[in-house]
Amino acid sequence: MSAFGVKRTLATTASGADDPKRTLVPTAAQIACLRNPKGASADTQTRDVEAAARTIGQQIFLVDVRIDRELDSAFTTIVQQRAGALLVMGDPLFTNLRDQLVALAAKHAVPAMYPFREFISAGGLINYGPSIEISASRYLHRKNPQG
């Protein structure tokens, strides 16, 4: 998943129009951003999120998860840091762990925004990107525009 959805979601906040974070958790002083630093698009997504956060004056902090066993401790950090919301960056690791991610966000009462619609099917609150199927189709079309 490109960082477009993340950038668009946070950039919308600058204008105040249709911002899900401001609507769902208007008092969130800081947002936790869950990322896999080893992911293929982690650097791009991180730069986009940090730039968008600076633009709107939103405090964020990054929480890294490289393997599934780190997920529980990541949520401990999110709770200890008193994140008002969670943004889950697009990564295959998180897609594979979506049921566990959604359950942990609910357990800790952390409003979370997810990268794909499939997280909503798993019980998540809101997504900022398309379905996995649409993302894959767009990716394949870019790789083979004639196909």
Image (cartoon, rainbow, N blue to C red):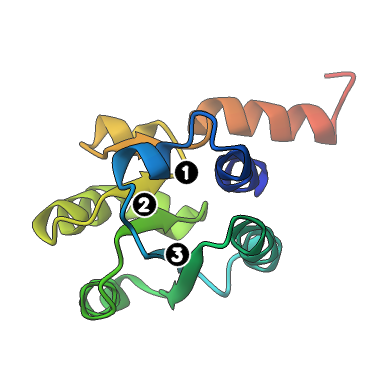
Q: Earlier in the sequence, mark 1 or mark 3?
A: 3
The residue carrying mark 2 is 96
Looking at the rendering, which quadrant does residue 83 occupy? Answer: bottom left
Tag nearer the camera, 3 or 2? 3
Does 37 appear above or below 138?
below
For the residue marked with disc 2, what is the amino acid? Asn
Q: Residue at x 67, y 42 (%)?
A: 4
Q: Which mark is residue 115?
A: 1
Q: Residue at x 50, y 33 (%)?
A: 132
Residue that lies at the very extreme toward the top in this rendered image: 146
Tag nearer the camera, 2 or 1? 1
Q: Assess disc 1: are there few (<14), some (14-19) or many (≥20) residues with their C-alpha within 10 Å of its C-alpha.
A: many
Q: Assess disc 3: are there few (<14), some (14-19) or many (≥20) residues with their C-alpha within 10 Å of its C-alpha.
A: many
- Where does the image place residue 74, in percent across and percent down from the top left? 30, 75
Q: Which mark is residue 33?
A: 3
Q: Earlier in the sequence, mark 2 or mark 1?
A: 2
As drawn, is 14 to the left or to the right of 116? Answer: right
Distance (Cα) linking label 1 and label 3? 12 Å
Image quadrant where one finds the N terminus: top right
Foreground of the two, 76 or 51: 51
Distance (Cα) linking label 2 and label 1? 12 Å
